[in-house]
Each structure stands twice: as structure tokens, then as C-alpha cells.
Amino acid sequence: MRDSFLLLMAHSLIGTGFFFLYVHHLRSIYESRTSIAHMTQLEREAMLRQEDALYFSFYKTLVSEPNFMNGIEKLKNVTDIEHPHHVNVLQRFYVLPEVTIAFLYRYSGYQRFSMLTCWRSGDMSMTGERCDGFAQAMQFYLEFVWLLGGLTLVVIYLYSTLLSENVFGGIYAVVSYIMFHSYASKIYERPMARENFAFPFILLQMFYLSVCIQKVFKQKEYQFSTFAMLKLTLLTGISLLCWQFSSIIFATQIIIMMTPWSFSSIDNSVSCSFTFFYALSQLFGNVLAYYYSSYSSKFIYSWQIGPAISLLIISLTRARQEDVSFSLKSIGMGILLAFSGQGTTINILEKAGISRSIDNTYAIYRDLILNWLLQAKVNFSTSLAACNPDLKRMDWLDLWELVKTLIVKPYCLYGVVMLAKFFRKWRKKNEQKTPSNDHVERAKNYVLEDFLEENHISMNDMTNKATENDLNECFKLLEECDFDYERYKIKKSEINNKQSDEHIEFMNDIKKLREQIHELQDKEQKTKQLTAQPITVDKQTSTTSDTKPKPSKNVKTQTNLTGSCSTKRVKSNKNTAKRSSTSNRSPNRVDMREVDGNTTTGAAIIQNDFLSFHYVYSFVQMIVFTLIGLSIKKLFFLCFTQGCVITPTICSKFWYRKQRNIFWTVSLAVFLTSLLDPGLVNVREEYFPKRVTNSNDDVETMLEWIKLNTERTAVFAGPVDIIGTVYLTTKRPIVNHAHLEMRQISDRTEHVYSIFSRQQSSDIYNQCSQLKIQYVIITLKDCTNEIRDDCDILSLWDDMQPAYRKYPQFCSELINKNVPSFLKVFSNNHYAIIKMFSQSVQINLKYSRMPEKSI
């Protein structure tokens, strides 16, 4: 009990140290990249793009209202983000992080005890005011993000320690994660991205699931725990409420759990009971997310519902079977059942009127798969999403960085060590050395002592001819081994093991013979019972029960064949097998039978470690994350993070118990070399990047113009990467935003982007006027009437509307010429704002020469 408490305290101290160091590391990187402490409020908000700006606007609404509940009610009825429609933000978006942080900001009292320093810039305007401190709303938000990043690192340490069963594996995983921080996490580039809030709980759920599986393997039984069910349900629900990809990750987890545990020693009923309650936790987590999202229909289309229901059915079916064998066919059937279950569930809900197909936010990912695999142009919004840098395919060079440092480097070093060890043994084995006379006499004395002790005879019995022949055979075997006592013991152990196997086989034959005799006697007994009287039957039964076959003399002879040096004639005592090899002679003399036993036990432990389902699940989950990450660049951090957890455990599982000195030496060498390169190089690149990701696009000037020159009710539209920033800073109503997975937003965005196409002005005006747009923001780089690559907006429109390729691009004409109903009211080096008029009068004045009048 005391050792467990000390171990827990040690892990807690190490994890706490990693937590605070990593939080400081994140805070320092973000400050060195952005200098956010010296920015104005407008500059800070202008850094946020795409959906990040939209989510921070919800947080800003909650903290700016006089009452927290007033802010909640306001978010339930928002008309400014999809003008003129009313939107329930709690139901439509993943705003659990913003609600939680705003609640803590208002009621924790943290801002009352934090210093807030404010000063003004040279222009002395209100926008020039700068404030720094945790009492500032954005700084508090960012601090919460850094704390969640620290939680992620602690879970990585505990997870890797659990799998590798030593602290060094956890430390190695943490250092690897920091070394590849630019690949494993984008938390300092996009702090408000949804994955920064969801992934700590996803990883914690995976860790706790592995703990539960390990507990089942140790106890060989499953005992239902309400507390464990609640934890799995809560972690699943929180993850679903924070990120739309959480459902996809849990769906892959459920499919992995469909794998039979037949390769392990766990009973089939135990594994089925565990997977049954695990599937229930997934369904309960989805119900929890559905309830706390104000009954959002997007959780009805969650990807894990079908697989979870299928796992319930599979668990109930397997529980009735006595033996379930592992095969790839069973995995394929599980995946097929998962997809069919998902489709059937959605069809039933749509037929019942509970959900609508337009609410399915996962349809865009299906269209993206078709776009990538078949190169099919489904629609404009799908093509636009496919050209998003975060949704592109992963670069193979980035994957090579992971493989090179986490896989190639350690295993190449392990391979070199093992080759060196192999050639050393091979050279030692083939060396022809003439032993000295002292060595020969010492080896013979060892053999003589062994022979006397094993056979329990004295020197007086050596006059027996048979005993002398047995001793000479032992000396002959020693001579064949070049008078090497260790090789002699190994050879002799092989002979004894072979004879032991023969003895076991002989005893098994005797056992089978006895069973056959008993069967024949039982048959005769039953036959006589049918014809004889009851008294006679009793007599025969007693006679039969007293009659037992006596063991043959050959059995005794076979039992004694354990101590001879020859395979032909063996004379040894039964007690030889009980003799301990560590006698009082020499410390270097080891009983090879004990060595073989330890080796066999170690191999069984290693095999059991590899076949433990919690390790199998973690390894397969890393493979699934790799496939997902290679498909979507945004999700490649899943592969890197799980790779940092798994990689230190593979070598540990195989080497830690077998050859501990090699494990520590090689692991330490790989650890130090990886820490220098690429570890320090990547950390330096994080603090002082060579390429600045957020270029100065002078968006602040445009935002200032909008705030000063447009009405508060003016409706804006524009590119998805900038329109959310306009809403955040100016609070002007917008008609579209960056969530293209929503069907209605996808259609609206297609209408807004029509200004970048080659359509006629009247068609574009009709599309924009239907959305009641008053101002359209355009990016000048996309209005050059030229096609640079396949992801150029004009190229996307040409693929969708090939009949319009002969016309010029409308926005390029709009910038250079006067077009009816459209007026350019603002322009800088990057953006332009076009005002649309609801009514326009066009007067064509033709020049005509007036005739001169004669006087």
C-alpha cells in the first residue's frame, strides 16, 4: 500500500511539473510570435480568422452582457450571423468551450485579483488603447486554452507510462511531443480552434478506456461500475460538444472494439460484457450531447450511433457463442454492419420526421471523399472546402519527419546493437581455443560433482562398471563442448528436456489407455445392469471400483531417465528435478534449466503484453489516425500525438524484461540524439519562425472604415476567411460564415462567391439581392481574371460553369469599370468593398453633333 502511494505521488509530481512547464512554453511561444500584450483590442481581434472569429464573438457576447443568463438567452436568438434568419447558437454551433470560459470569467472572481495594465498609443484614440493582464477577456480565454494544452501533455505522460510500464516511456513520449510540437499541435497558431478543446478529453477517454481494459485483463472478469460508465459517458459527451470530428474518432474506436478478444486469455463472456457496456457509454454520451445542445439535430447524424448499435448487437450475439475465433472476415463484417446500421438509423429518423437531411452536417465530408478519390466535382462549396489548406492531403515530407525520428532512428540503433551482439556470439562460437590443463581439470571436477550430486552416489560406487560408463559419457560430452562448462550445461539441458518430453508423451498415452479401459468397463457395467438383478449390479460395481490398473514398471524406468549425459542409457534419481543449481560451488555455475524456465516465462510475459487488448487497441488506433491524417492535413496531429504515445512502448515491451541494459542504453542514446536534432531545431523554429504565417494584409484599415462609414444595420457578405472577423469587430450583420458543412450556409456562400465568377451582372445581382446583401467584400488577389492553379476561385467556377469561360471575370471588371447597381466604396492593397443598390437608374447619353443654324 505504501509503495502504491509513493508511486502515485511520484507520477503526480512528474505530471504536475510537465503541466506547468508546458503551459509556460505555450504562453511564451504565442507571445513571441504575436506580441499580443502590446496590441490594441482591434489588432487582437483582427488576428482571428474563419470560424475562430465567429466563436470568439459568441464569447464576447457572453462576457459583455450585464448578466450571464442574459448572454445565454441572446445566443439562443441571434439574427446577425445568418441575416435575416434567427439562429440558436447553442444548437447550431459547438460553443461549450465559450460558455464554460465565460462562466468562469464572470463568476470565478479571477479578474478581481488580477492586475490589468492599460496604456494608450501615440494617436490617443480609443482604438489605440492597449491593456494587458489576465483580467482582460481575451487573455483569460487564452489562458484557459494553455491550461487545456497542459492537460493534454499530462495525459500523454500517463498514457505512455501505462503502455510501456516504466516512467522513462512516459518521459520519452512527452519530450517527443514537444520536439514535434509544430506537427503534433497547432495550438499557438489557432488557439480557438475546436480541436484544442476537444482533443484533451478525447485522449483522456482513450487513456481511461485502456485502463479499464487492462483491469479486465488482470482480474479475468468484468464487474460493472457505475462510476466508470459515468466517466466514459461524460468524456464522450464533452468531446462531442466541442468538435465535429469527435464523432468520427469515436466511430473508429467503436469499430476497433468490435474485434474479438479470442487471441487473449479472456473468456468470451467477459469481453462481450465489457464491450456491451462500452457501447452503452457511447450512446449515453451522444444523448448527453444532444440534451445539452438544446436538442441539436446534428447529433442525430453522429457517426458513432450506427457503430455503437452494431456493437451492442455483436456483443449480445457473441455472448451466446462458446468460442469466437479471430479473423479478418469478422472485422470486415463489423465495419459493414456499422455502416449499414448508421444508414438504417438515419433513414428511420428521417421517415419519422425527427430529423431532416438538410441538418446533416457530415454530408460535406462524404462529398470531400468523392472529390479526393474520384476527382468528382460535386458542387462549388465542396470544391472550395477541398482547397482549404487545413483540409488538403498531408505532405509526405511531414510524415517522413515522424517516421525518421520516432521509428527509423530507434529501431536502426536497436538493429545495430543486435547485429553486433549476434556477430560477437558467432565469433565466440567459432573460435578454436585450446583449453589449458587447469581449465580441463576444473571442468571435469565440475562435471564429476554434478554427476555425484544428481545421482546421489559416493566415490565408493564408482567401481561399478555401469556408473563408470555413465561418467565417461559425461566427460565425452564435455570434450565435444571444448571443455566449456556453460556449453556443456546447455547441451545436457537439451538432452534432459528431450527425454522429459518423451516421458510426458508416454504418460499421456498411459492416461488415454486408462480412459479407454474405464469407458469399456462402463459400457459392460451398463449392459449387465439391463439384464442382472440390483444386488448383482451392486456387487459388480464395487468389484469394478476396486479394480484399478496398476502403473507399469516402464513408467518408473521412464521417470528416472533425467540425469544421464547419453540419450541411450540414463540412470538418475527422481529428486534430480528438485535440485537447485545455485549450490555452494561457484557463482558462475548456473543451472541452465532455470535459465530456460526464466526465458520461457519472460517470453510469455512479453507475448502477454503484446496481446493485451489495451495495447492492441492503442496501436490500431494509431494506424487509423495515420490514415485519417494522411487524408486530411488538419487531423494529422492525431497521428503525431498517438505516435508519441506508442513509439516508446514498442521497444520497452520487447526489451525491458528481456535485456534491460540494452534497453536503457539504446533508449538513452536515441533520446539524447533526438533531443538535439530535431528537438532543439524545431523549438527554435517555433519561437523564431522563418516564415510568418499571418501576413500583414491591412485588414485593420478596412475594419476601421466599416465602423466609421456604414450603418449599424448594414448587411455584409464576403470570403469565408474574413467575414467572421468583420462580424467580431464591427458587429455588422453577415449572411455567410466559414461553416460550409451546413447546407444552408453552403448555398449562401455559393451565391456570395458568384461575384468572383464570369456570370452576367444581372444574374449576380439577383443572387445577392435575394440574401438582402448591402455590402460585398472582395479580395483583390482573386480578381485578376487569371488562373494560377486548380484551387483558384476562377478555376473552380470554370469547372462548374464551362459555358461562361468566354466571358471576363465579373469582379475584375467591377474594380476597373463602373457597373450598374454596384459601386466600389473602399479599396486598399488587399481588399475592396462593393456597395449594392436596391434600385438603379441608368441613363445612356449618346454624343450627336447639333446642326448649325444660319443667321
Image (cartoon, rainbow, N blue to C red):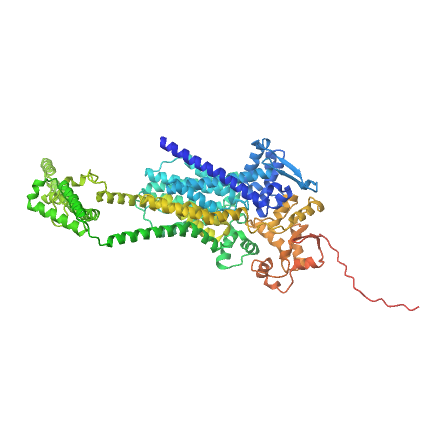
Q: Residue 825, position in %: x, y?
A: 71, 52
Q: Nearer the viewer, residue 719 or 368?
A: 719
Q: Quadrant of the C terminus?
A: bottom right
Query: Could you tell whether 78 is left or right of 594 in the image?
Result: right
Q: Image height check: is 852 above or below 208?
A: below
Q: Which residue ends up furthest to the right in the rendered image? A: 855
The total number of labels drawn is 0
Q: Nearer the viewer, residue 796 or 479?
A: 479
Is residue 501 in view from this perspective? no
Query: Could you tell whether 481 is left or right of 29 in the image?
Result: left
Q: Residue 189, position in %: x, y?
A: 55, 46
> Residue placed at 51% from the left, 51% from the top?
363
Q: Quadrant of the N terminus?
A: top left
Question: Splitting the image into 4 quarters, where does residue 279 fall?
Answer: top left
> Residue placed at 33% from the left, 49% from the top?
326
Q: Nearer the viewer, residue 49 or 694?
A: 694
Q: Image height check: is 781 above or below 590?
A: below
Question: Splitting the image into 4 quarters, where does residue 131 fall?
Answer: top right
Is residue 13 in view from this perspective? yes
Q: Which residue ends up furthest to the front in the rendered image? A: 437
Q: Residue 132, position in %: x, y?
A: 61, 38
